[in-house]
Image: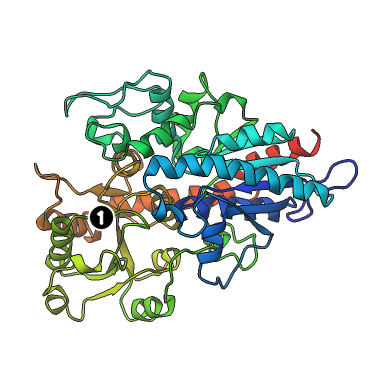
């Protein structure tokens, strides 16, 4: 069947999918992109966000090509930041979200549009229960890597005790996974985790996972095949990624260059014009995502490390982080750097002037760098980023991990040394070669008849003939 013809049943009706995302930029982006892939293959998609996010997003140049509906998280006026605690927010999201989701489904049914299935972010397992009430098939979508979800699953099952108590050098063994140490485990299951509300969220997402009709992950088989095979005896997950705009992969979806739902304002033209003035592979791109907040001391060390590297750099510093920049940094690096509050990361990563990516190793950023073929300097901060950094450096070998000192800080000399190691013509050759290899495998996975493309077709085909 040609792309875009549509998956239809015997009565000619398109598969009608309800897609519900967890209300955070790093979750919206991949699930929205997966929705565009489903829509491109002929499914009818309705995408659901919270009322607060819908009402507070800046206008997009490339809005989604399907309807966007809303549910309530119980904080319609202020969103997550108006909640008294992390746990309170998630309790209200479940209570108000499930009720308003039921209302949405009933309203659509009354209008003659019955959904066939609900695709939902794994962080919200209660959506499965709502879907089953209406007889819908259920697809649990996991926005983090297969490896990280495998760790959380073992914690949920009690096969890894949390918080994990292990000596720094003690090895942690999980089928299908490389040997891990404490430093490689997600911070949410380590001793001293300051966010128990998030720990409960990531662990309890597996409470009803066996009841879902499909489990899918924003990864691709070739990248994590050993992990996927190691998981098979306990739970079967399918890889359907990388879910990033088609312009950077197979180019089969027209005008698909941006995710299309941004919670931050940006001026991409400034970035592009600045990058255009620099030689190929000469610029260090520094970005730590939408959530990570560096300490004042770490921000200072990172800044002076960039200065010490003597490289050109483009640094994304969110407005809430800007006050942490050292007072004399701009003067010391005049003519070598550009600081912006936000940017279109994919456009920056794909610019030929970018030589490496200093990253927190959030999964979306990691997948984007792998797909575009950009070497990384890993500076993980929390949650899944430590595990992602382990795979980037030791398994996929597309970067180096900046070492922490005894105080848990990456010092300026380490920042500079890691950048030089990746950017150096000799030392970075193997890293760049590996980055190029994963770039081709990522693109092949989502292209026609690739591993992820076949899996998406299989799921849609099964939905058609239910």
Percent across and percent down for residue 239 are: 54, 39
Q: Residues within 10 Å of mark 1 (few under 14, many from 20)?
A: some
Considering only vertical position in the picture, is 9 above or below 23? above
Q: Is residue 449 visible?
A: no
Name the residue beneath numbered marker 1.
428
Residue at the spot 14% in from the left edge and 62% down from the top edge: 300
Q: Residue 393 is drawn in which quadrant? A: top left
| Quadrant occupied by the C terminus | top right
Nearer to the camera, 417 or 184: 184
> Which colour assignment does the render follow?
rainbow
Query: Residue 196's x, y, as percent?
Result: 33, 36
Residue 139 image point, x, y percent: 63, 37
> Going 31% across and 25% down the picture, which residue do you hit?
162
The residue lying toward the viewer, choosing from 73 and 201, is 73
From the viewer's perspective, tell me whether residue 388 is left or right of residue 450: left
Does residue 322 appear left or right of residue 196 in this picture?
A: left
394 relative position to 51: left or right: left
In the rendered view, tell whether residue 298 sits above or below residue 317.
Answer: above
């Amino acid at each position: 069947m040609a792309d875009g013809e549509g998956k239809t049943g015997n009565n000619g009706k398109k598969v009608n999918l309800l897609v519900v995302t967890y209300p955070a930029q790093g979750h919206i982006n991949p699930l929205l992109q997966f929705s565009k892939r489903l829509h491109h293959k002929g499914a009818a998609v309705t995408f659901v966000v919270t009322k607060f996010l819908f009402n507070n997003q800046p206008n997009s140049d490339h809005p989604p090509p399907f309807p966007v509906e809303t549910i309530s998280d119980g904080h319609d006026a202020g969103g997550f930041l108006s909640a008294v605690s992390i746990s309170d927010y998630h309790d209200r999201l479940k209570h108000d979200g499930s009720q308003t989701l039921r209302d949405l489904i009933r309203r659509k049914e009354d209008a003659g549009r019955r959904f066939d299935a609900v695709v939902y972010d794994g962080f919200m397992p209660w959506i499965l229960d709502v879907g089953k009430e209406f007889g819908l098939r259920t697809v649990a979508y996991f926005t983090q890597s297969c490896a990280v979800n495998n760790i959380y699953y073992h914690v949920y099952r009690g096969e890894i005790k949390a918080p994990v108590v292990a000596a720094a050098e003690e090895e942690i063994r999980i089928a299908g996974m490389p040997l891990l140490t404490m430093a490689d485990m997600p911070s949410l299951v380590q001793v001293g985790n300051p966010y128990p509300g998030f720990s409960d969220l990531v662990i309890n997402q597996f409470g009803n996972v066996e009841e879902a009709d499909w489990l899918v992950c924003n990864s691709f088989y070739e990248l994590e095949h050993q992990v996927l095979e190691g998981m098979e005896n306990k739970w079967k997950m399918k890889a359907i990624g990388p879910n990033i705009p088609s312009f950077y992969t197979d180019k089969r979806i027209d005008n698909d260059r941006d995710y299309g739902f941004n919670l931050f304002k940006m001026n991409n033209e400034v970035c592009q014009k600045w990058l255009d003035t620099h030689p190929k592979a000469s610029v260090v791109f520094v970005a730590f995502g939408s959530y990570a907040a560096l300490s004042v001391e770490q921000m200072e060390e990172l800044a002076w490390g960039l200065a010490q590297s003597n490289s050109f750099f483009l640094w994304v510093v969110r407005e809430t982080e800007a006050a942490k920049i050292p007072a004399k940094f701009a003067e010391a690096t005049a003519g070598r750097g550009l600081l912006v509050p936000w940017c279109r990361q994919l456009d920056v990563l794909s610019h030929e002037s970018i030589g490496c990516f200093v990253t927190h190793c959030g999964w979306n950023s990691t997948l984007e760098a792998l797909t575009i073929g950009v070497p990384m300097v890993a500076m993980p901060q929390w949650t899944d980023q430590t595990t992602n950094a382990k795979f980037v450096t030791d398994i996929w070998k597309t970067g180096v991990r900046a070492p922490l000192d005894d105080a848990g800080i990456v010092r300026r000399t380490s920042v500079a040394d890691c950048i030089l190691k990746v950017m150096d013509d000799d030392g970075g050759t193997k890293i760049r070669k590996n980055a190029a290899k994963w770039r081709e495998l990522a693109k092949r996975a989502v292209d026609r008849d690739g591993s992820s493309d076949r899996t998406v077709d299989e799921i849609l085909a099964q939905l058609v003939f239910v």
